[in-house]
């Protein structure tokens, strides 16, 4: 099954045009969670507790363009 992983920031959505094949929705969601954790480690919170201008979430979209999962980046 093909899923698309969009990146949501403060003021835009970076759309995944190609997508990627996964065995099922669970595999796509697990991939999104893994990537969200990696991004969170690269962009830690500022000392004053505010986030830098970084991605806020990864959104898994199905082949119809419907969001089926959202992995926040914390």
Image (spheres, rainbow, N blue to C red):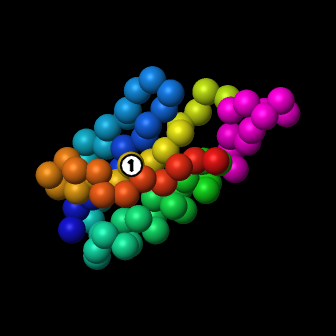
Q: Could you tell me which secondary element the residue under label 1 belongs to? A: strand
Q: How many marks?
A: 1
Judge from the rendering whether residue 24 lies leftward or rightward of residue 50; answer left or right: left
Judge from the rendering whether residue 61 lies leftward or rightward of residue 29; answer left or right: left
Q: Is residue 46 magenta?
A: yes
Percent x, y for residue 36?
55, 53
Occupied quadrant, residue 14? top left
Judge from the rendering whether residue 30 lies leftward or rightward of residue 73; answer left or right: left
Occupied quadrant, residue 1? bottom left
Q: Give me the residue at 22% from left, 61% from top.
A: 2
Q: Answer whether residue 19 is visible to the viewer in this image.
A: no
The residue indicated by pointer 1 is 59
Q: Is residue 55 magenta?
A: no
Q: Give me the residue at 46% from left, 58% from top.
A: 32
Extent of the magenta region: 41-51
Q: Give me the residue at 45% from left, 23% from top.
A: 11
Q: Give me the residue at 49% from left, 44% from top.
A: 57
In this view, the residue in front, 50 or 44, is 50
């Amino acid at each position: 099954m093909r899923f698309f992983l969009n990146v949501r920031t403060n003021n835009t959505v970076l759309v995944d045009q190609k997508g990627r094949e996964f065995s099922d929705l669970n595999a796509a969601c697990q991939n999104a969670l893994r990537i969200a954790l990696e991004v969170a480690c690269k962009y830690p919170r500022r000392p004053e507790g505010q986030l830098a201008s970084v991605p806020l979430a990864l959104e898994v979209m199905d082949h119809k363009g419907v969001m089926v999962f959202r992995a926040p980046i914390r």
